[in-house]
Every structure is written in structure tokens, then in C-alpha cells.
Image (spheres, rainbow, N blue to C red):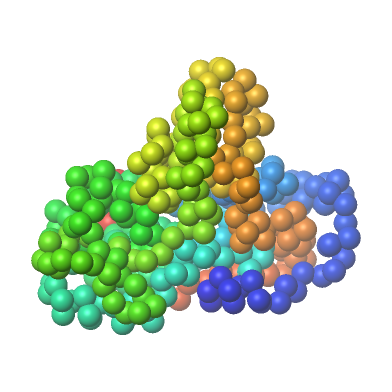
Amino acid sequence: MNVLEMMQKQDHMPEVYKTLNAVEMEERVRKIKEKMGEKLFIPGHHYQKDEVIQFADATGDSLQLAQVAAKNKQAEYIVFCGVHFMAETADILTGNHQKVILPDMRAGCSMADMADMAQVERAWPILQELFGDTILPLTYVNSTAAIKAFVGRNGGATVTSSNAEKMVAWALGQKERIFFLPDQHLGRNTAYKLGIALNEMAVWNPLTDSLEYEGDIKRIKVILWKGHCSVHENFQVKHIDYIRKTKPDMNIIVHPECSWEVVQKSDYAGSTKYIIEMIEKAPSGSKWAIGTEMNLVNRLIQQHPDKEIISLNPYMCPCLTMNRIDLPHLLWALESLEQGNIINPITVPVSIAEDAVQALKRMLALA
């Protein structure tokens, strides 16, 4: 199910939850958490709203949360406050006795859905014909379980924004070329940092089933899937130019899902974890313009009143699909569990999970 289908999917949450006030909902969530104890585990992604993140038993990025959930053997129910591909990864890594639940099935990821298996199955034989057996696929963890399974079957691995550099270097030690899905910006920024020139990178366009490249294709070392994060692509060079002009003493730090041009013009670029740690370590009085999701930026502003922090793009809004998980949906999921009813379970078919876990294991063994 892609993000559009998720957004169009009917929300079956009873209307009564939409009429409750926040104080009442918070109290009911607390009581259920206390009652269920270790049987319940709530991972919360950094981009979640404060109304949800306050109840998270662990916060972090997608893979980190899935790993923490997998280590928590006591939890029977994992109510994942994130998006669909994150809950899939949690289901892949957790035990058979554990059930993964997504409070709102409309919480998808536009980037993950920019690469579906039908498109990849058309692309792979064409690329094999062009380049022979010289390509190793890599996929960002921000991808569907089916894409992870494709990569696993073909000897590749997953990557995170924290370990992408190490994984790309590893992959290029295995084969002459890599096929990087689904985020072209993370792939391009990582490869460039490793010394690969822009003219050694091509883009695969899944809408036209064609390779976008000018010149001798024998020079190509990196094939980038034409996908992107809808949030991070909204940070542009013009925003950096404005900061440089109006606040020349302000540091600019961005996520590597931003475009190559934005990353090159910034002072720092790194994963969500990297951004959080940079702000935490920064001296009091320092100034920061951050290019990442707005819920996280607002949380950093609240947590660090001794620093001047702004969004690099002042007109940014939070991630639309991530924000589908809200307090009413969390309460609905928990009260349904309390009544013995599992809503919105996330279950990855065994055949897909077995191949996907190979891609994850290769990464975890190296990173």
C-alpha cells in the first residue's frame, strides 16, 4: 500500500475519540500503560508530535527503534509511533510472540513509496543488461519491506543516514557499481563525500524506465533511484543564502536527505542523531538554522533555550504522514488492546521478511 492509498484509506477510529479533550486522553493513556506494564512497548520516532512522544518508552530513528523493540523480549505489544515502513522493520526484527501495531494505517512515507517492487522489477533486468553482474543494490532503511527483500536477495544491504558512508564504501568494495534506493539525495551526498564525482553518478527514472546520464555509461559508479524526502527537499539554497545575508554568525546544519547543493552550502550535514548531538554539545549562546523536520526543530528549540535555534526554512510544516499518529489514535490503539482487540497490525509475509532480514543483517554486521 503506497502513501496515497494510505491517506485515502478510511479511518475507522470511532468518532468519540475526536471529541475527547487532551487532559482526559493523556490520563487514559497513562492508566493503560501502568496497567499493561512490560507487556506494552511504545517506540516514538523523533518526528512525532509532543502529544505522542511524551508517552514513548524509547525515542530515536526508525532502525534504532526497531532494534530496541527487538531486544525487548518482554513486550507482547509494540505500538509503533512512526510510519508504515518503520513498523514493518520492527515486525521483521521482533519475535513471533510480539505484535506490532501502527495506530493509524494512513501513516506512510512518500519517499519509501517512490520505489515499489513493480518498478524495481522492471529496472533491474535493464540495468543488468547495460552493466552485467557489476551492480550491488543498497537501500535506505526508509524503504518498504519488499524493497529490502529485493536487496537482500541480490547480496546487498540496508543503510541508515548515520552509516551510509561506511555501507557505500563496503558495497563498492564488493562490486564495481551500486544501485542506491530510494533516496537519490542521500546516495549522491554519501558517494560525493567518498570522492565519487557527480559525473560518475547516474539517475534511474522509474516513471520512464530510463537512465538519466550524459556521456559514456562505463564511467558510472553509482546509480541513484529518482526518489526523495518530501520534507527535506523543501530546504533550498535560497534559504541558506538568506541566512548568510541576515544572520552571518549562524551555523547551518542539515540532514543528508537534502539536495547536494544544500548540503554543500551548509556548515554541517548529518543524520537526525548527529543533528541532535551537535545541538546538545553546542556552547550556550550559539546560533543554529536546522534543515530537518519541524516537530524535531521545535523540540530542540524548547530543550535548548540558551541557544538561538530556527528552522532553515521558516515556512516548513511537520511531516504530513508522520503526523497522522496523534493522541486520539494512540489512545484508540491502546484501549482496543485493553479490550482484547488488535487494530492495525503490521505483519510482513515470511517470504519477504526472510530476504529483508538478510539485508538488515549485512548492515548490522558491518556497522
Is residue 217 found left or right of 53 in the rendered image?
left
Q: Position of residue 119 (x, y in %)?
A: 37, 79
Task: Name the residue at 16% across, 80% down.
Answer: 129
185 or 51, nearer to the observer: 185
Task: Name the residue at 64% across, 51% down.
Answer: 317
Is any part of residue 100 visible from this angle? no
Is residue 332 found left or right of 5 in the rendered image?
right
Q: Position of residue 363 (x, y in %)?
A: 30, 53
54 or 280, nearer to the observer: 280
Which residue is farthest top? 284
On screen, 222 above or below 350?
above
Task: Name the residue at 38% across, 81% down.
Answer: 118
Quadrant in the rendering for residue 270: top left
245 or 175, nearer to the observer: 245
Task: Name the residue at 36% across, 59% down.
Answer: 184
Quadrant in the rendering for residue 127: bottom left
239 or 52, nearer to the observer: 239
Is any part of residue 202 visible from this angle? yes
